[in-house]
Amino acid sequence: MVKMKPSRTKNTVKSATVIGESPSQPKTSAEIINEARSSLRILKTQRPFTPRDDQRKLFGSTSSRAPENRPPSAFSLHARSFEGSDSRPISGARLTPLDHKPKIPTSPSKDEGPPIPKPPLDPIEIKRVSNARARLFKVASQGNLLSDKVINPEETIKRLNSDSSLNIKTFSHDADAAVLSQFNANILANENTECGREEMIVPIRVGSLSTQPSLGSEQTKQDSRSSTCPGNTEIIKEQNRTGSSSGSRTSEGETEKEILYWDTKIQPILDELWPLNNGNDAEQLWKKCSSLHRTLLEGNMLGKMCKRRAVLLKTLYKLVDVGSDQLSIQLAKLILALKVSGKNLLNICKLIFKISRSENNDVLFQNDNILDCLVEVLSFADPLGNIDAFLYCMGTIKFLSGNMILLKDLLNKGLVKTLVQLMKEINDANRTSDTYLCSSGHLLVQVTATLRNLADLPQSRSRFLSTGALLELCVVLEQHVNDKDICTNVARIFSKLSAYNDCCLALSECTSCYQLFLALLNRHHRKQDLVVRVVFILGNMTAKNNKAREELYKQKHSVETLLTLFQTYHELDVKVKINPLKTQNKSEMDESKNQRFSEVEDILIKLIRVIANLSINTEVGSALSGNQNCVDLLIKVLEYKTVDKCEELMMNAAASINNLSYYQVKNSAVRARQLHITDLLMKLLLCNNMDAILEAARVFGNLSRCKEVRDFIVQKNVDKFMITLLDAKHQDVCFAACGVLINLTVDKSKRPILKQDGGIKKLIDCLRDFGPTDWQLASLVCKTLWNYSEKITNAVLCFGEKETSELLELLPAYLDEEIALDIDTNGFDVDLLEHHKVCWESEFVPVAQQLLHRIQCHHSHLEALPFCPLQD
């Protein structure tokens, strides 16, 4: 025997329970959830798809930047591109003026006649001679001759003396001697600077260019012999000890320990590089450079600690021309470890950028810790002082972040924090001056594109939140609101992050973002890939956060902006369908047409979602319900589209109308056109898509509170369709169908429909099948039966004998707490179990107790009399 429990409430159930009726007392949590389930709908949608560029470029194929207004992605780079004066301090000394008096040519004599003009020289010959002269003076100024081969100074002088085309007096002229002397003095003053010339050097004194007899001295011969072996360690040791200025590369302050380490550890490696370089053995060069890197690290000579850093850099720069990507990666890592700056830093970043443009080279970055060097450049160098270098460094990181393995590695190296700090420095500089606004914009395109890739990783969300990335990205948007590339990248970041509750909440708390998003929609309303992401973000923010709904609504012209955008893209959608783009053939026309349809419809889908989510707020929903333009646009979608081709769009439009129809305001535009809306919903109700049918049934549940709509429902046999839906074995579908049927039972003349079409039996089946797991649905079934049995005289005559017996068995069992709440708790969290119990206590028990009491009072074991429906 089932134990009956006493009634928990003395309130009686109203004879006509209408969905959406506002209670006089404060709503419980269960009532709020019930209203949201039956009436107000939060819409979800997919995140916009981001296509991937086929080629790796600084600025993708969709970039709004004109090619002439952006840095190049392709360029040539050679050893001669590097400067030999990396980090050289600017000297304050000025050269003394030369005592040179130009010789005035004498006028030709009358007997000689007018001078015969000389034919113009070939431009190529002029350039060759000019370059040769420049190299000659450069060599002379440093006391060395430049050549690809080792030069014997004695033979060189003999050749100069014997050459009839060269006047020896030219070299002994006072002016030229002064020039050579001055250049030599300057070089000697800076002999500790970095990076010498590109070619091999041979020590020859300035005086050897004259005709002095010292050219044939033993010392000169010795210098000549030593110069034939540029890697001769013993000569270099001797020069280091003697401090000779002619060939020494030592620096003041170098300790004996450092000299010894250089001579025994480093110089032998450099000596081995020269013959390998001439043979271009890339594999061996790579190994030697790796060994050099380890040796420098062990000797604490990386960075700017090494006194002979210039010699190292000069040697490494020459290896760039070998052309091996693997070797170039090792060179770049080593050169960056030596802390170059200026143009050399730019060239190294360009070198790495060129290598990273090929996806096949990603494995080189996986097998080497070059990523640490790249991140270190962004962390310690001055971004505004090296903005071009940063651009190519960030371009490299952007490319590599497209590789999931490297992306995770970059995340673990703290790249998010590094990039946020970089954005902050740029934002702070742009606040005070717009000097770097354009160039920093190019850099921020790379930064935001990289952050866009990092946002794909779930583990990156905590880093975005802890570093304040969302706020800095909002500042970037504010400062570069006219830059479509930056705005699109930031929108892509937010569209990814806002799909998660924690990031969405953090973004909603950035009060400046609402006005920024509206400004983007106004300024770039024709840029579809940007618009679709902004409305997607707004849809995410307003889905579960009532404060976000209020903040967006109270922004100036927010509703007008959304509706104007709605109108614009609806007209564009119609225009594309009527006048498709003219293409060369039918297949191209169909492809282009479908693409345009997809883009425009996606914007409409996500825009309508924002309206639906906004209308959940009572104030906003009431205002939008009375907005004639808003309702008209939603109706146009229902009129113009079909479920077969535009399923999600039609369903979102129906859900928005459902939310707006919930509010019974005096100036409701939905109520003014409710019959027309009901008629339009018939094509959703009669389609083969159960989701579309469900949305239509929900709207019928709200609109059926009006008698005109209820009459229309009966006239179009929608009531029979709702009874059929009770067999759907889907809880939400049964819930929506019950919502319509419970409103139909308000009219006494429509109550017999339930029994005639088998509705009573199907309602009891729903109670049996879904009651223990869905007390909201069970309560709705009991309310429908309560309204139906208002004029009951005999339970059997009212419900039927079999149906009455089932109710007398089910209701007592479901009213027993031990039986009703005895469910499998696996997979249920505490909050859900508590909500389940609250729904049973507050919604099901009161109405079920009174329905059971009514049936028991009117139940008789006497033979049932024929049922005659009451006539009003």
Image (tube, grey):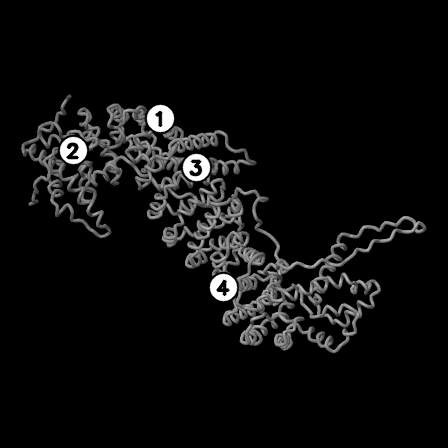
SS at badge 2: helix
Judged by depth in the image, the label closer to the viewer, 4 or 2, is: 4
Quadrant assignment, res 727: top left
Tell me if label 4 and label 3 are in contact, CB under 8 Å: no
Label 4, label 1: how far apart the Cα atoms are: 64 Å
Q: Tag 4: residue type? A: Asp
SS at badge 4: loop
Mark closer to the chain start, 4 or 2: 4
SS at badge 1: helix
Quadrant assignment, res 329: bottom right
Write down the residue under mark 4: 368
Q: Tag 3: residue type? A: Ala
SS at badge 3: helix
In this view of the protein, which residue sits in the foreground, 273 or 99?
A: 99
Write down the residue under mark 2: 785
In this view of the protein, which residue sits in the foreground, 446 or 53?
A: 446
Judged by depth in the image, the label closer to the viewer, 1 or 3, is: 3
Write down the residue under mark 1: 628
Mark closer to the chain start, 1 or 2: 1
Label 1, label 2: how far apart the Cα atoms are: 38 Å
Q: Quadrant of the N terminus?
A: top left
Label 3, label 2: how far apart the Cα atoms are: 53 Å
Extreme right residue here?
Answer: 111
| Tag shown at residue 782 | none
- Residue at image coords 11%, 29%: 792
Q: Residues within 10 Å of mark 3 (few under 14, many from 20)?
A: some
Mark closer to the chain start, 3 or 2: 3
Tell me if label 3 and label 2 are in contact, CB under 8 Å: no
What percent of the width, then of the height, locates residue 573? Answer: 45, 32
Quadrant assignment, res 722: top left
Write down the residue under mark 3: 519
- Residue at image coords 53%, 49%: 58
